[in-house]
Image: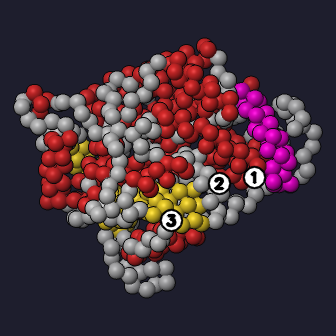
Amino acid sequence: MRAAAHRTTALLLALVWAVPTAPGPAAAAGQPAGPVAETAGVRVAAARAAAHGVRFGPCAEQEDLPAPVECGTVEVPLDYAHPDDRRLTLTVSRLPALGTDAAGERVAHQGPLVFHPGGGAGSRYFPLVGELPTWRHIAGAYDLVGYAPRGTDRSALLSCQEPRHFVKAPTPSPARPSTSYKKERAAEAASYARGCARRAGDALAHHTTANGARDLDVLRAALGEERLTFMGVGSATYLGAVYATLFPARVRRMVLDSALDPRPERIGYPQHLDRAAAVERRWTDFLAWVARHDDAYGLGGSTASVRRSYEEVRAAVAVEPAGDRVGPGQLHRAFLRAVAYDDHWPLLAAALDAFHEGHPELLVAQAAPVPDAAAEEENAYAVRTATACNDAPWPTDFAVWDADHTAAAEAAPFGTWEEAWAVLPCAYWPAPRQEPPVVGADAEVLAPTLVLAAERDAIAPYRGARELHAGLGGSRLVTERGAGQHGLGGGPNDCVGAHLDAYLLDGTLPTADAECAAHPEPRPLALRTTTRGPAPAHRAGPR
């Protein structure tokens, strides 16, 4: 299903997020500037959107969304300090509430549930989850609403380089990069940042989380709602938290799933560094699972031996890329899925096993770039990068990056440097840097919210959920212990699902913070039908 593909894209981009204060043209003309003008601009844009509404109808063919999903548009200002100047058109998708629950009983309509998956990706495909059993109760009561955030799709699409260059393959991925390799990657990052400025112009500075929150309020008005019901995952939990800070009285219900740490001092570079250890811990979880299923995969009966099996494949594709398209860079990119989604574990392990048996086809299918998806992936990365770089100050001296990541890689070699390259354009960013806002709202104004978190989440380390929960008065935290799935809502944990349903359908939160046991681990997928023979020539040595 396309929604599943977009979940993977969002993950890969998520491994890489404010209120603008620089005076604009209005200040020169003696008009209000900064937050005052932007607040007024939101009121203007929201009133305009409420008057026009969203005229839903059949989705255009390029949307690839079949009936009964409907599509429409809503306009938002590029710059909320000047709401009557340039406007952006956001595509909106909707599956109207089904009207009955999973048992066929009639249920009351509760309005729209707006969803954002984080990671720079849009959520136009979100309404398709109404077909899934885990979403059926919610789809009965709510219109499932997705949208293309500013900079994505037809919403003034942001692109910083030719997409075909974005998915070039094969590429290296040294665990201990040389000085010359670091210089090469730094030059590429600087070039990418310049490309963003050249292609986007003055619009680049308006890709911020605060503007995303303002867009969300305009969408709320266009949908005809006095208050917003919203669910955000990963980086979109920060979007939701900023919305709750700017518009606390406009929140009806809000689910913040796999929450990031919203404290101003952690936004940007510190948050990025926090992930290194979390990614390594979750990578080790995957290796240990494969080792427990050595009878299915034959990759080794210990974490260390499975790690060697992976490194052998990495060394082999560095010498001879699999299918001429999968080098170490593509291999690493594919196996990042294991860090966030354990339902990918069986197939990824099977791909390693098959490669060791001399059959690279499954690995190629898992890891090779898809040219047809290049434009969409580059766009999502551009939006993700622009928002992250605009939202907070980042170090501008590569020596700082080099020292910090060299130290981090000693304890966390799997993902540290690849994550560094992903966000390195922020070191050379040409747009003004913003100071992150203090996020939080009082329980007397903000409706109670639900925060979901997995204890071993690598994309959103667990401490972030605790900090977000502490800042939102009246919120409740539901923790899945001993698990690391990123994005819990609608997933395999029945306990988490029950809390989600109770909150969205009845407004019921647990009386205190709650814990759920980990969902069952995936079952192994064994494609090999014979015992392993002698090691192929590309094998680096014994396990």
* Residue placed under numbered mark 2 in the picture: 342
| Amino acid type assigned to the residue bearing label 2 in the image | Asp
Q: Residue at x 76, y 34 (%)?
A: 311
| Image depth: mark 3 or mark 1 in front | 3
Amino acid type, label 1: Trp
Q: Which residue is mark 1?
A: 289
Identify the residue at horizontal 39%, vertical 73% (top origin): 507
- The residue that appears at 53% across and 57% down in the rendered structure is 453
Asked if disc 3 and disc 1 are in contact, CB closer than 8 Å, the reply is: no
Q: Does residue 179 show up?
A: yes
| Segment tinted magenta in the rendering | 290-318
The quadrant in which residue 336 appears is top right
- Of the numbered discs 3 and 1, the one sitting upstream in the chain is 1
Mark 3, residues whose alpha carbon is within 10 Å: few (<14), some, or many (≥20)? some
List the residue tagged with mark 3.
513
Q: Position of residue 481 (x, y in %)?
A: 62, 60
